Structure formats: structure tokens, C-alpha cells
Amino acid sequence: MRECHASERAQVERHLQLFCQILPLHPVSRPLWNQHNRSFLKSKLLRSSDPEEIPDKGLFRYSTGSVTNSMDQNPVQGDLNWRLSAHPITLLVFLGIRIGALLMYLFGVLFIKDFVLVFILTLLLLSADFYYLKNIAGRRLVGLRWWNEVDTSTGDSQWVFESSDPNVRTVTATDKRFFWLSLYITPALWVGLAILAIIKLSSVIWLSLIVIALILTITNTMAFSRCDKFGQASTYASSALGGGIVNNLAGGLLGRLFR
């Protein structure tokens, strides 16, 4: 076996140390790594006196903070990742207020035990959630808005629905999934808390707060659901003249929640 120069030997040792740090961290390579493989690799590297035959540094380039798996997939539009949102601040505030109201109620029931204080704080969060969702989050995340008008001549109450033009504004799949999932899951969680309050008789007094939460959350859920249906119907009608109504109806049947 030919001897390597001191500089070449040092370079081989450095490459071997880097390789020994990288290989055991990789989940696929971990079961294959043992002392025999280490000795075999070292002997193969030291046999080469030609610097060109020594593995390139690029093969051993790594990051000490994280070793990425080649099988991992990059996040795509539609995943529940707030970084993919077109309006991340709006989304985080929307989710934060919704989750905050639930946590405030749970924290008050379990630890504070002061009904008046918890009632006021939770009611403020529920009111902020109702207003923010109705006027800001719904319009920015999914392009929907609703309000209620009273006809002064007849005294009748009318629901007014507004949706953005899909040809002008595109709603991202991530924003849509976050919006509709939170819209339907939140009332279900409050229903679960109501059942627990009934089962645990000592918490029946908290039912009044849960009833208010259900009224506010279900109102927004029903209103935005109807607003979305009217918006889809308007889109189908406007595209019918262009001959694309069949395609739109077929696409609508696939559902909006998990696309």
C-alpha cells in the first residue's frame, strides 16, 4: 500500500470525521453504520495517493443545526401551515382570538373559580372574535362578508351577503382550510364544554357563558356558510353564458373544505 503525504492524510482524516458525524444521524443510514464500515471506509480513503480520488468536500457538506431527509416534502399550498397564508397576520389574530376565548374559559373553570371575572374576560374575547371574523377575517381570508339590514318601511330584517369576484381576487387553499375548519370546529368544542358542564353539576353556572359563545359562533358559521353558497351560485350563473356551468357544478360537488 502506497503511503500518502502528510497533507493528504490530514485531509482524509478531516473528511472521515465529517462523514462519521453525518452518517449516523441519517435515519436510513443509522442501522448500517458500525465499526467495520468505519474501518473499511478509512482504509479505502487512505489507499488513494491521488488527490483527485479523494472524495470532494461537497460530499461531506452538512449543517450542524439540522440534517434534512431527502424523503421530506416541501409544504404545498393547502397544507395547514400559516406561513403559506396570503394574510398571515390576519390568520394568526383570527386563530389567536378564537383559541384565547376557549382557553380563558377552561383556565377560569379549572383555576380562577371567579365566575364574574372569567365571564367578563371570556365575553370580551367572544365579542372580539365575532366582530373580527365578521368584518375582517372573513373578507381577507376567503373573500366573504355578511351583515343584517332592517327595512325601515316594513320593519323586516334582511341578510345581506357579499363575496369577492374570483376573477379579481384569488383565495389561497391554506386560508380556506384554516377558515372553514376553525369555523366548524369551534362550535363543536363549545358543545363539548356544555356537555361537560352538565355532567359536572358544579359547573352548571358556567352554562350561561357557553350559551352566549354558542350563539355567537353558530351565527357566524351559519352566515358564512350561506354567504359561500350564494357566492358559488352567483359564480355559476355568471359563467353559464360562457358555457362553463357544467365544469363549475362538477368542481363544486368536490367540496371546498379539503381541496
Image (cartoon, rainbow, N blue to C red):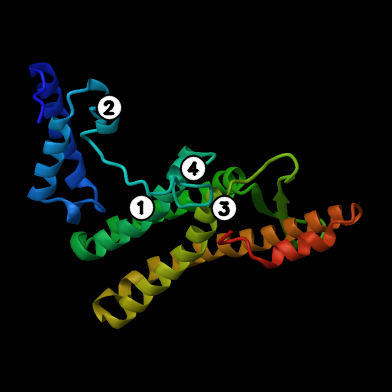
**What separation in Å lies between label 3 and label 1 (alpha carbons)?**
21 Å
131 lies left or right of 206: right
Position of 201 relative to 77 (above/below): below
Task: Report crowding for label 4: few under 14, some 14 to 19, many 20 or more residues within 10 A (C-alpha).
Answer: some
Give amino acid for label 3: Lys
Disc number placed over residue 84 in the picture, else none: 4
Mark found first going from the N terminus, 3 or 4: 4
Q: Is residue 163 visible?
A: yes
Position of 175 relative to 45 (above/below): below
Verify CB contact (< 8 Å) between mark 4 and mark 2. Answer: no
**What separation in Å lies between label 1 and label 4 (alpha carbons)?**
23 Å
Give amino acid for label 1: Gly
Tell me the residue at 71%/62% (across/down): 251
Q: State the residue position of label 3.
A: 176
Verify CB contact (< 8 Å) between mark 2 and mark 1. Answer: no
Q: Quadrant of the C terminus?
A: bottom right
**What separation in Å lies between label 3 and label 4 (alpha carbons)?**
11 Å
Task: Report crowding for label 1: few under 14, some 14 to 19, many 20 or more residues within 10 A (C-alpha).
Answer: some
Tell me the residue at 52%/39% (across/down): 87
Mark found first going from the N terminus, 3 or 1: 1
Q: Nearer the viewer, residue 192 or 59?
A: 59
Q: State the residue position of label 2.
A: 56
Q: Nearer the viewer, residue 245 or 191?
A: 245
Task: Report crowding for label 3: few under 14, some 14 to 19, many 20 or more residues within 10 A (C-alpha).
Answer: many
